Amino acid sequence: MKTICKLFPISIFILCILAFDISGNCSELVRYFPEIPGFTKKGEPAVYNPDNLYNIIDGAADVYLNFEFKELATLIYEKGEDQSLIIEIYRHKDLNCGFGIYSHERVYGVSNYVDVGTQGYYETGILNFFKDCYYVKIRAYDLENEEPTLIGVARTIAAELPGDNHFPEALQDLPYMYRTFNRERYIPKNFLGYSFMNKTFTADYYNPNIPAGAYSFFISMCDSKEDCKKMISKYREYLELPEEEIAEGRYTLDDPYYGTVSLLWQGTRIKGIYGVNDEEYISGQFAFDRDDYILKIDESVVSYQKSATSSSDENYRLIPEYAVDGDLMTRWSSAWSDPQWIRIDLGDEYNINKIKLYWEGAYGRSYNIQVSLDGTAWKEVYATSTGNGGEDDLNIEPVNARYLKLNGLERATQYGYSLYEILVFQTGN
């Protein structure tokens, strides 16, 4: 087990459920436990609230309560003498908290994301997902055909849960370029360990083209402008800075634990960056605007919205179609191994002379580009073994092509090959 359930063995877990008094159980959550072919339900669902959550997850209850936990329903399923499932359905205050507890327990480095709810992932013995304010954890013990069974059960539950399959809106305001995706988090209280920093969305970044490399961006959501003012004032007071009038705008603070922390107060939000102190770069990050990431596509680009395929996809949300959609807030990412490829069918024969690549932080150190008229016979038009990520403007000798293929030969990071966009230009424009 790689989750919080490792805190106690299954025998104790079962005893806790059996010992729990379920009389008067009227939680809406119990309706979402499905009938699973071949399995029988062991007793009735057990329901917990904030007052007795410690009875089942003693050591972790405080974490769930921080995410404004409302209720939990659990149920054991059995199949034969040895196979069993435990389903836990949590309800939190809202979408932010539902995403927050899921992102808190999401295992770093997960590669097997699955199309369940808003987002889910599978690892041996577990499947976790969230949808709106609901967080669902499914545990399997000695289960045959484990992965497809867990995915099927999870999808059945997700289809019945209320709410929409979308991430919190605030995540759209976190810059996309160089973001380490699936490392976004929501911290309801004590962000960075400070009691005055609450309701914060944050994400990790890696830009190989700046000295700092790794850094973090965050947005703290305030209930009012006065609350934003208080947060900055308390931060300055903690750092023992002299009193001054606090107004909307930029602040640069020297934090003893996080180095240079840059803040931008706008309305009821405070944006922040730490881990980098390049003023020009910071200003660019603060100026992030969703519309700036929609590329202006004209007839010179022949790859826009064309058919794209790949050797592999990191998960179902990072697919090759996103590398030709003109949107730098979407991307394709491969499995974490060498070699990998992405191929574009331009739909017709064009004479091309330029290719532009927008790499995510996981870029190719060594890669080549080939073209073909029939998708079978390939000609190399570009190759490098010293790729450095970022944006690659590649001028090539004019060549007729219908298909274009980028072959990743050696990764620059431990992750896969990841591209926000591939633009292919026809000659004469």
Image (tube, helix red, strand yellow):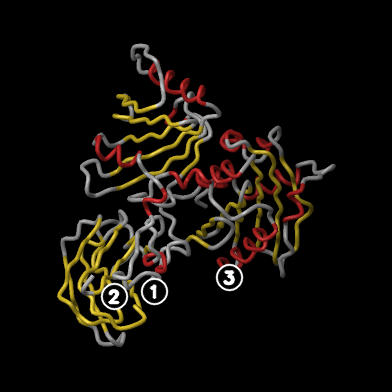
Q: Which residue is mark 3?
A: 145
| Coordinates of residue 169 in the picture (x, y in percent) | 52, 46
**CB under 8 Å between discs 2 and 1:** no
Q: Disc 3 versus disc 1: distance between alpha carbons?
A: 37 Å
Q: Which SS class for mark 1?
A: loop
Label 1 environment density (alpha carbons within 10 Å; few <14, some 14–19, many ≥20): some
Of mark 2 and mark 3, the one earlier in the sequence is 3
**Given this view, does label 2 or label 1 mark the residue nearer the observer?**
1
Type of amino acid at the residue the image marks with label 3: Asn
* The furthest residue to the top: 243
Give the residue drawn at x 23%, y 79%: 351
Q: Is residue 196 above or below residue 103?
A: above
**Residue at x 34%, y 78% (from the top left corner):** 346
From the viewer's side, name the closer residue of 94 and 268: 268
| Residue 400 visible, this orientation | yes
Q: Secondary structure at mark 2?
A: strand
Q: Which residue is mark 2?
A: 405
Q: Nearer the viewer, mark 3 or mark 1?
A: 1
Compared to residue 76, the image places residue 250 above or below, namely above
Quadrant in which the C terminus is drawn = bottom left
| Left or right: 404, with 40 as reference point | left
The front one of 409 and 355 is: 355
Residue tagged 1: 306
Q: Is residue 336 above or below residue 279?
A: below
At 45% from the left edge and 63% from the top edge, which residue is drawn?
315
Q: Are marks 3 and 1 in contact (CB under 8 Å)?
A: no
| Circle 3: element type | loop
Residue 380 x/y as whole percent: 19, 78
Please tell me which of labels 2 and 1 falls first in the chain: 1
Q: Nearer the viewer, residue 427 or 205?
A: 427
